[in-house]
Amino acid sequence: MNSTTHSAIHSDELIQLEQRLTEQACRFAVTTVVRALPPTSTWVGAQALVESDGTLHGWIGGGCSRAIVVQAALEAMRLGQPKLIRISNSEVAPEPGVEHHAMPCASNGTIELFIQPSVPAPSVLILGSTPAALEACVLSQRMGFRVHAAAHVTAPFAPLGVQRVIEGFNADALRVLMPQLILVATQGDSDEDALEAALQTSAVAVLLVASQRKADRLRNTMRVRGIPEERLAALHAPAGPSIHARTPQEIALGAVAGLVTLRRMLEQAEANTTATPTAGADVLPVLPPQPPCEAMASVEPPARYINPVCGMAIDVASARHVLGTGGERVYFCCDGCKLEFERAPGKYLAIVQERRQREVV
């Protein structure tokens, strides 16, 4: 990543770049100056676009502020959440939802910027032209996924608005799509070929619509066909939580629920990593098997959180900083507490865990 790389382009070129990156399903963030107090070299309404490798296009101020903006934009992309940041040396009271940074320039001006990240939804590849597969295409699009399909018979997909349909289950053709999630809903029509091709891609998870007994048989068949164990670990079967489905529509509903669950697990895995995105950040981590449906209830963070560094109670929704480390999400009220935590994370994680144990008792 080169956080100092930038290019000055006109607003219409910026719009064209945004459209191209959106079509290519790339991560980026648009930054807009919403306040500028002199002396500054920018103005209200000035915009820039930051790519996932840290390249900045446009203009939001001099070199002093660019590095801060790029890092904040990368963090917004990683979390998938917008940010409002202030770069200033003026003494002002902390404001909820405003992330403060010191102005490194000698001019001591003040700028505030709104950062809006664009994080593409995971791409889903659905294999099969069964009624359940077709219904899953419709439901997956309604859930916001980017949907592709592959089947021996492709005509039924024409009215569904699927982005791309491939005839057959050729592994090389499926790899070109670079799917992040695959749903195999062939249900007896070339199950082995479809599953083998799916597991030969780099998809982080392959969901199989099948009973547990059939899934075990197919898993053994994949071993015989030479699929390594590390790829078999990406196989999730049954495809989603048990909803006692009977009709194709109900089967598709359960399978898409499995896709949604895995999508949220992917987002949580990314939010919990402390690494900032790089040019390869769109490659998602390998996931553990889905938990049973009884354990799928989402766990929301508490409305109030005790900062382990200073002991202050924080409103989680307006925390200045959030770090994911050691399986914990730690919330901070200011830059100082975040920096102190980063100097001795083990010390403060122990405080968090001890406090939680006391609450349980």
Image: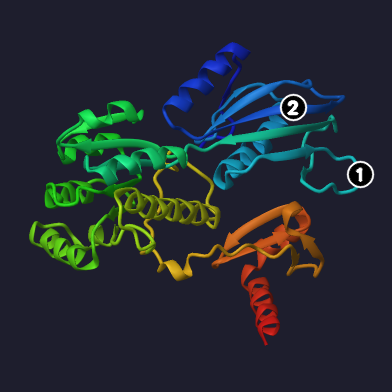
Q: Which amino acid lies under the numbered mark 2 shown in the image of this protein?
A: Val
Q: Quadrant of residue 307?
A: bottom right
Residue at 24 percent across and 67 percent down: it is 212
Q: Residue 220 in the image: x percent, y percent?
A: 13, 65
Residue 14: x %, y % from top left? 57, 18
Q: Secondary structure at mark 1?
A: loop
Residue 158's tag is none
Q: Nearer the viewer, residue 237 or 249?
A: 249
Pick out the residue farthest to the left. Answer: 224
Q: CA distance from mark 1 to mark 2?
A: 20 Å
Which quadrant would the C terminus be assigned to in this image? bottom right
On screen, residue 334 above or below 353: above
Q: Residue at x 45, y 56 (%)?
A: 261
| Residue 360 position (above or below residue 255) | below
Is disc 1 in contact with disc 2, using a CB cutoff of under 8 Å?
Answer: no
Secondary structure under badge 2? strand
Q: Residue at x 20, y 31 (%)?
A: 154
Residue lying at the far bottom of the rendered structure: 361
Between 337 and 126, the residue placed more toward the observer is 126
Evaluate whether residue 133 shows in this view. Answer: yes
Left of 221 or right of it: where is 230?
Answer: right
Check disc 1: other Cα within 10 Å, few if <14, some if 14-19, many if 20+.
few
**Residue 208 appears left or right of 353:** left
| Left or right for 258, reference 305 | left
> Which residue corresponds to mark 1?
91
Q: Residues within 10 Å of mark 2 (few under 14, many from 20)?
A: many
- Residue 163 visible somewhere in the drawing: no
Residue 296: where, in percent of width, then height? 48, 65
Q: Which residue is mark 2?
A: 33
